[in-house]
Image (cartoon, grey):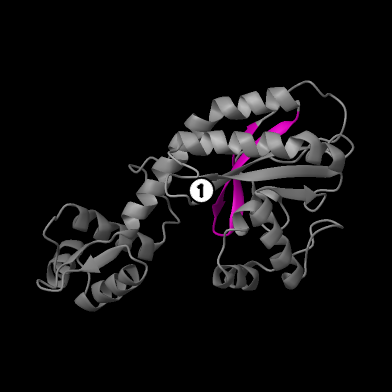
Amino acid sequence: MPLNRSFKPNNLVQTIERASSILDLLGQSPQGVSIRELSAKIKLPKGTIHRLLSSLSYFGYVRQDSKTRNYLLGFKLVELGNLLLNQLDLRKEAEPFLKDLAERTKETVHMVVLDRNEVVYIDKVETDQHTSGLKMASRIGLRNPAHSSAVGKTLLAHFSDEELKNFIEEKGLAKRAENTITDSAQLRDHLKNVRAQGYAVDDEENEKGIRCVAAPIYNEGGKPVAAISISGPAFRITKKMIQESIKKEVMETALKISQRLGFRERK
């Protein structure tokens, strides 16, 4: 159910409510707003307003004009808005390609984005061709660790050394299945190969008995914004099948979606 802002939740976090009020006011004021004005309109002490603005400034949600000293909306909001639009456009643009891939391979196709260093499933296409075999636990909206999934690894492969170091420190490398890569040095080497070959394989690393092959989707700037995968029981998605056909199917479909988003390969 979508959030109806006319009904105020009982567990509303006060700091977030105050920050939201500040952002709303700044959005209505192209010339910016002073701390004094914000204090008067929101009815909070100037010291409290200053602390909120300092935090919002640090994360890029507001900025301060160097001449007037007024506060304005920050460019982080533009970035987030563009990400949201990209995600909405992404599902629409990718849908026919995902359905075609699922029909041709007769396996389950997923699409994910990376959010807070976890993969989030934003689409899933299944066929009823195979009624036997293992049933995957994936669903739209589900989160999974990035290091143990093919879709996650194909996105992590584009992290800088510093970003990957921070990721490992923040998330750790939890063992999800017998084949999960839990050693940081091994993961780094593995991701280098993933980036070089253009696809990743989850060899029963996230779920026992499930094997997946994934490739990244790029936006017009060449930045990976999502990933797609073919997933199925390991007895059907064999290593031989991956090399002979599946990796090519996934990579070609990912490229077609990327091109719909404006991506052009460098020659």
> Which residue is located at x 55 percent, y 67 percent?
160
- x%, y% of residue 200? 71, 50
Q: Name the residue type under label 1.
A: Val
Name the residue tied to disc 1. Answer: 225
Q: Which residues are magenta?
A: 107-124
- x%, y% of residue 55? 34, 72
Q: How many numbered marks appear?
A: 1
5 or 35, nearer to the observer: 35
47 or 136, nearer to the observer: 136
240 or 88, nearer to the observer: 240
> Residue 186 occupies which quadrant of the picture?
bottom right
- x%, y% of residue 187? 72, 65
Q: Main secondary structure of the magenta part?
A: strand
Dot 1: element: strand
Residue 123 visible in the picture: no
> Residue 158 occupies which quadrant of the picture?
bottom right
- x%, y% of residue 121? 61, 43
> Residue 244 occupies which quadrant of the picture?
top right
> Which residue is located at x 51 percent, y 48 percent?
225
Residue at the extreme bottom of the image, as rendered: 47
The magenta stretch spans residue 7: no
Residue 81 visible in the picture: yes
In screen coordinates, is 206 left or right of 88? right
237 or 220, nearer to the observer: 220
In screen coordinates, is 120 left or right of 20? right
Vertical order, 44 against 219 (above or below)? below
The magenta stretch spans residue 123: yes
In screen coordinates, is 232 left or right of 215? right
Residue at the extreme front of the image, as rendered: 267
> Which residue is located at x 76 percent, y 34 percent?
245
Vertical order, 27 against 220 (above or below)? below
| CA neighbours of label 1 inside 10 A, class few (<14), some (14 to 19), many (20+) | some
